[in-house]
Image (cartoon, rainbow, N blue to C red):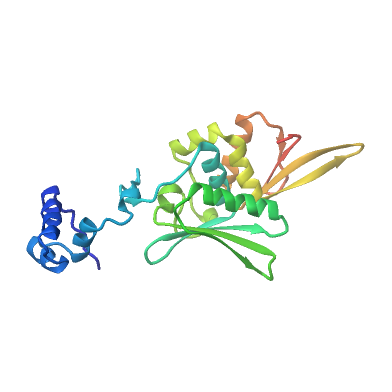
Amino acid sequence: MRTYVRASTGDSHRGARAGIEGVNDCEVARRLGVARTTIRDWRRPRNFANFDRCPRCWDRLRPLAFCDADYAELLGLYLGDGHISALVRTQRLRVFLDSKYPAVVDEAEALLRRCFPHNPVGRALVQDGAEAILFVHSAHLSCLFPQHGPGKKHDRPIVLEEWQRCIVRSAPWAFLRGCIRSDGCVYINRTGRYEYLSYGFANYSPDILDIFESTCLTEHWPQFFTSYAYDHYLAGTDR
């Protein structure tokens, strides 16, 4: 287990002066009663100046670059077919997409790189290349997506927080696009001599379906529902 000590400004000044006096890191750490690595960071700051503070847990956070539309789309991708898992020192978000649609995969990867400019982002192909898994590592993914929890999404409540609802209201189509691209489809609906572009979204979580439906209704987009409890279809829109 690691112990972290928040040293006072006076300690850091004394540590810096000790460096000028030629005292090594270990000796300064012994005199001040702090970790040797803390003295090292005082004397030779690395990238800590580039960190922000997470507004949720107040721990260090690599700078992010979210606009409302980007966050809304990423939220849709996560709720549709995304998964957050805990690793030893960080967390990993994975989004599962169909490799049959390379433009969708490329744009989703670009979204991750745009939102997490200082975090590792990558892509893996599985099932003989039929499925693309996009991933990003960050220790604050569960802060960004507080819907994360143990078990499957459809086995636990999924409720947006007020700040998330404000973002979705600000960029509703971006949110719907993320949902549809991760767990939906786009198709031509043909009825007699008429045809029109339609969008489908399937999910086993009734809460996620309710969020999708309420977003459609808020924007007054026409929709109809099949007899299946987990399918919602949005039709007749040119989005």
Q: Residue most toward the bottom?
A: 128
Q: In the rendered image of this protein, does residue 3 appear above or below residue 222? A: below
Q: Residue 75, image x and y in percent?
A: 53, 46
Q: In the rendered image of this protein, does residue 145 appear above or below residue 237? A: below
Q: Nearer the viewer, residue 204 or 236?
A: 236
Res. 202 visible in picture? no
Res. 78 visible in picture? yes
Q: Quadrant of the N terminus?
A: bottom left
Left or right placement of residue 190 versus residue 221 in this view: right
Left or right placement of residue 202 versus residue 91 in this view: right
Q: Nearer the viewer, residue 167 or 132?
A: 132
Q: Nearer the viewer, residue 169 or 209?
A: 169
Q: In the rendered image of this protein, does residue 117 appear above or below residue 87? A: above
Q: How many marks?
A: 0
| Quadrant hosting residue 38 | bottom left
Q: Residue 22, image x and y in percent?
A: 12, 63
- Identified at 54% across, 32% down, the residue is 169
- Identified at 25% across, 58% down, the residue is 44
- Identified at 11% across, 53% down, the residue is 11
| Quadrant hosting residue 45 | bottom left
Q: In the rendered image of this protein, does residue 124 appear above or below residue 114? A: below
Q: Residue 141, image x and y in percent?
A: 44, 53
Q: Residue 41, image x and y in percent?
A: 24, 58
Q: Quadrant of the C terminus?
A: top right
